[in-house]
Image (tube, helix red, strand yellow):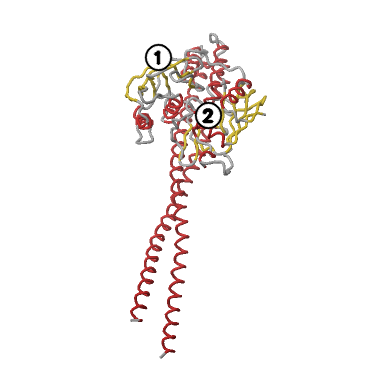
Amino acid sequence: MKDKKIGISLGIVCFILALALTLQIRTMTIENSIVSQTFANDELKDNLLQWKEKYEKAVEQLDSSNKELDVIRKSASTNASNAEQKTAKIKENNMLLGLTNVEGEGVVVELADGKSSSLVLDASNLLIHDGNLREIVNELSNAGAEAIEINGQRIVNSTYITCAGNVILVNGEKISSPCTIKAIGQQERIVRSSRKSRRNITST
Amino acid sequence: MCGAVERAGGILHQLKLNDLSVTVKKESNIKINKFNGALTKKYMKDIRN
Amino acid sequence: MKVKVDKQKMQMAIIIGIITLLLVSSMFIQFKAVDKSQESNIESLRSDELTTQIATYKSRYEETMEQYEENQNTISEYKSTMDENKESTNLLDKELNDTETLLGLTDVQGEGLIITLKDTNEATYTASDLLTLINELKYAGAEAISINDNRVVNLTEITAINNSFIMMNSDSRISSPYTVKVIGDKSYLMSTLNLKNSGFVDLMRVNNLEITVEESKNVVINKYSKEITAKKMKEVE
């Protein structure tokens, strides 16, 4: 009778042990796949860096060719009709397109993820979302902004603001909190409009 | 978590911004970067002429 | 006899003790591995992000190089007009035209989509819906967009005035039905809007809004009807 009891309890313990071991083996395979994944990721990262470098070099080339073009356009067009007007207009249009660095008066909006507190019901409220940035750009445009930039990314005609996984992409480049949104335009109009629609914004 | 279109619009959005930290500063001389890259017109053709 | 039973009990206690120890330690290892498998989720997400980033840099590299080559061509054309002492008026006009086309100051045509949005008894389109659509279209590489023949330019704003009217480009009132015309790669635009569940078409239909999307080989989009000017910004080197 006693031997039977011992046998049964040992059997149960062995069963549990075996179960644990199986699980263990299963997780081992997961770990193996992690290793191969980091491997693949390293390759992707290398690839990404290569393309980024190529792209940055191309941008440099484009910049210098733009400058060269400005110079030669001027010197080649001395005898063309309305040449001065036209060259000035081309330069202005390129500025309006967002293809040149610009400066002027305006406002700087600082936006950062909130700090968690017991009052916040939904943690998602604490994070900056792509939609927040789109609405801010729309609002600044509505207030007559002439140029807008988010963390160094200029808003141009082809700009999109989306998210992929947990990151926000502006012009396809990663943006993360804190976001600095710069806008050139009439300060009063911009500040007034931001007060009207967002009462909690602090203005200094 | 992101990408959802909020139909409730304004109010929800405002609540959201309530939880974010936002400041607006006036500045007299802001510098803004140019767009790094090119704007394309592969598909659209001018029909002015 | 009594002593023998105690010995047996002790033996069993030791065995059970060892087995329990093994069990506990294997469970610890298990916990560690669970932690790691969560990490692998993040890891795989990252590789997704990496792939999209690579695709972005690649296409922007190509666009930049194309523009660079176009610039080089224009430069050499200017040079040859100088060498041959010819007028450069045509070249200047072409350059000026190109910048105006990119700004949205000329009528344009090309392949693309015509999207029709209609309010229903249950739901109305909001300014935010239109903004979302425009963002999606730009993500899919749209080159020109108009809503009810109002051209969308770089800093076009879209805001609600009241329940039935939406304002864009500071003084154009628009209302349902909305006809959104877009020029770009029509199959890519189409597939972006038609993504299952997360695409714009499904998002609107879930909300009981009416939407139809039509491909066209020749969409005509009107120019922006006002001037684009800058009062506050100046170019810097």
Is disc 2 surrounded by few (<14), some (14 to 19) or many (20+) residues within 10 Å?
many
Query: Which amino acid type is marked by label 2?
Result: Leu
Q: Nearer the viewer, residue A186 or C189?
A: A186
Q: Are marks 2 and 1 in contact (CB under 8 Å)?
A: no
Q: Secondary structure at mark 2?
A: helix
Count the numbered circles shown: 2
Task: Name which residue lies at 43% across and 32% down.
Answer: B5
Question: Quadrant location of residue A20?
Answer: bottom left
Q: Position of residue C46 (x, y in %)?
A: 46, 46
Task: Name which residue lies at 53% across and 33% down.
Answer: B15
Q: Nearer the viewer, residue C14 or C69?
A: C14
Instruction: Give the numbered dot on residue B47.
Output: 1
The C terminus of chain C lies in which quarter of the figure? top right
Residue C119 as seen in the image, left or right of residue A94: left
Q: Residue furthest bottom?
A: C1
Q: Position of residue C152 (x, y in %)?
A: 46, 20
Distance from label 2 to label 1 (Cα)? 28 Å
Q: Position of residue A69 (x, y in %)?
A: 54, 22
Mark 2 = which residue? A62
Chain ID of residue with mark 2: A
